[in-house]
Image: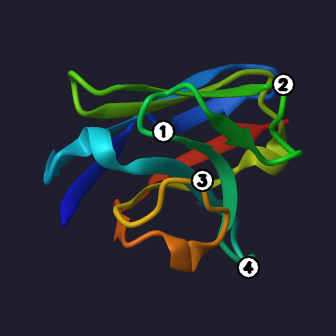
Amino acid sequence: QVQLVESGGGLVQAGGSLRLSCGASGRPFSRYVMAWFRQAPGKEREFVAGIRWSGGSKYYADSVKGRFTISRDNAKNTVYLQMNSLKPEDTAVYYCAADSTRLRIGVYIQEYDNWGQGTQVTVSS
């Protein structure tokens, strides 16, 4: 198991930016596929972005493509989500997730076996 702790959430105006961080501890972080999911009030948790262990392969949900960037620093056991041009519809609790069993980036909740506690992102109009 790997323990995940998110940080960097907050309140921002539409058009603004935030950078989320997810620190990992436990088993070797560099071998995991890492991803960010989000869950808005009354909605299901959805995939936002994922990155393979090497950082060379990334995948984004259509709703954030061109605005969000996922990256990782394996030396620091940290994955980041840079969020630009934020919209009110980006308001949600953002969760960091790790997949210890696959090599490809999954988009479904059940493909990830380690989760952080979440960090709130609120975008005002």
Among the 4 quarters of the image, the one containing residue 86: top right
Task: Name the outermost residue toward the front.
Answer: 103
Among the 4 quarters of the image, the one containing residue 63: top right
The N terminus: image quadrant: bottom left
Q: Is residue 53 left or right of residue 65?
A: left
Q: Residues within 10 Å of mark 2 (few under 14, many from 20)?
A: few
Q: Which residue is mark 4?
A: 42
Upstream in sequence: badge 4 or badge 3 = 4
Q: Which residue is mark 3?
A: 105
Q: Please state the horizontal and vertical placement of residue 24, each as a whole percent of the image.
A: 23, 45
Q: Which mark is residue 66?
A: 2
Q: Which residue is mark 1?
A: 9
Q: Please state the horizontal and vertical placement of residue 103, each as a whole percent of the image.
A: 49, 54
Report helix, strand or loop for mark 3: loop
Upstream in sequence: badge 2 or badge 3 = 2
Amino acid under disc 1: Gly
Q: Residues within 10 Å of mark 3 (few under 14, many from 20)?
A: many
- Whole-angstrom CA distance, mark 2 to mark 1, is 20 Å
Report helix, strand or loop for mark 1: loop
- Whole-angstrom CA distance, mark 4 to mark 3, is 26 Å
Of circles 4 and 3, the one toward us is 3
